[in-house]
Image (cartoon, rainbow, N blue to C red):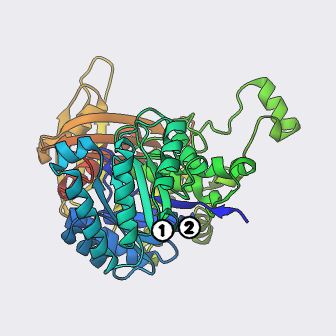
Amino acid sequence: MADKLIIFDTTLRDGEQSPGASMTRDEKLRIARQLERLKVDVIEAGFAASSNGDFECVQAIARAVKDSTICSLARANDRDIARAAEALKDANRGRIHLFIATSPLHMEKKLRMSPEQVLEQARLSTRFARNLAADIEFSAEDGYRSEIDFLARVCEAVINEGATTINIPDTVGYAIPELYGNFIKTLREKVPNSDKAIWSVHCHNDLGMAVANSLAGVQIGGARQVECTINGLGERAGNCSLEEVVMAVKTRKDYFNLQVDIATEHIVAASRMVSQTTGFVVQPNKAVVGANAFAHASGIHQDGVLKARDTYEIMRAEDVGWSANKIVLGKLSGRNAFKQRLQELGVQLDSEADVNAAFAKFKELADRKSEIFDEDILALVSDESLAHEKERYGFVSLAQHSETGERPQARIVFTVGGQEVQGQAQGNGPVDASFQAIESHVKSGAEMQLYSVNAISGSTDAQGEVTVRLQSNGRVVNGVGADPDIIVASAKAYLSALNKLHSKADKVAAQG
Ligand code: KIV
Ligand code: ZN
């Protein structure tokens, strides 16, 4: 029988460390439910001790998601570990994931601890965690740049204390597949009790090799857990991408001979949900989930695919959730058809009131746009106005005027804490004028770091999806807005970013 490969998703923890990718509690819950639908084995829901907000997210996910193991990160100290255990109290299956750095550079420069002190701290904190939970993962941060004999002593010690999974991260994305695979293999050989734990890989993508390194860790090194994120989301160049690693192992079962339990038909919906929530657009040529991943432009390829699809296709688009018929609903579609489509897309709204609110928005959109695509529906349900948290700023209406040779003007009505206000301004273009109109009232002083527009479903009658990245007092947030009118979408995105700036609490970073 094939060994099982455990898929550990860290979109909500390591993925969220990407600048601007911070998510609200409701957004995280929605993504966690989608990960459960995907049948992810372990969901790292957050870093409970990093902030009260993160604690509440881990707790809410532990209460809502019952089929996957829910995990919280913790530094190797009693306070963090106790906080993680508390947040996971109501989980069906909870995992405490503690970590400490083991590379000479990190121990000396970051922790200012000697190797023996690190070893002792790893040992004691694993013991402490083991008294609070049965499922304990230990990570040696910057493990790949650690001295292998020292790392082996640490791993042996924490396994003796009851760690059930040992994770060896390539924290800075420095590894090369063959070298990383051999590193894991040699390390396991050096650890006398290595068979008492599951070995895990966690690779960052700084040199574009996170997926290749993870697969080498599995194939050469014998790891049986891969840590990854949807769309490869993560700090800097990101993490190992879940969809790529899963489809590689499934498509090349002849080579890997591993069992992966992921329900791959939910991959595209998960990818869209993460990209629409965080504002991190998926590049069109991204493997598996990019818009072009299954598009054949060249005549030779098209001809080949029409004659026999396996001439040029190694995976089936529908197996990862690309629907064959993308036009789904229109103006005449009723509430039941809408609800059914939500179910098919794997979207679970929290209450009938949410379904009603989403349906009202759908009707509004269908009045303006004749064909409603899956992407439109996903944008609509990720709209902040469906969120339960009370948002400070809400879009009401916008009027703008631009004409060649004249300076564009915008007048916007929006709510601040439930009260309607108006702002009016001129700008270099209509988008700039709308942002100035909002700022004429809010005066956030935030600096814009990124503005991008993306047509949700291809053609000019598509909804525009806008991402706005703002920075204020060292915090970076992304706001996303969608509307057939891109100036309105831009204003919504700006208000959404302001909401995030307003609500986002400072938290302790896991690395660095
Ligand atoms: O990259 C890393 O080292 C991590 C650990 C905290 C697990 O994310
Ligand atoms: Zn990481």
Which residue is labeled 1 in the image?
33
Q: Which quadrant, please, contains the N terminus?
A: bottom right
Name the residue that disc number 2 marks.
37
Residue type at mark 2: give it: Arg
Question: Judging from the image, what secondary structure is the residue with disc 1 in?
Answer: helix
Q: Position of residue 312 (x, y in %)?
A: 77, 35
Q: Residue at x 56, y 67 (%)?
A: 37
Q: Residue at x 18, y 58 (%)?
A: 505
Given contact means CB atoms under 8 Å apart, are the residues at marks 2 and 1 in contact? yes
Residue 111 percent coordinates (x, y):
18, 50
Q: Residue at x 59, y 46 (%)?
A: 220
Residue 121 % position (x, y): 23, 63
Residue 164 is situated, as x and y percent measured from the top left of the image, at 44, 69
Residue 373 visible: no
The answer to whether residue 427 shows anywhere in this view is: yes
Q: Nearer the viewer, residue 276 or 353?
A: 276
Examine the rendered structure and indicate whether residue 225 appears above or below residue 309. Answer: below
Identify the amino acid type marked 1. Answer: Arg
Q: Is residue 128 above or below residue 122?
A: below
Quadrant of image for the C terminus: top left
- Give the mark count: 2
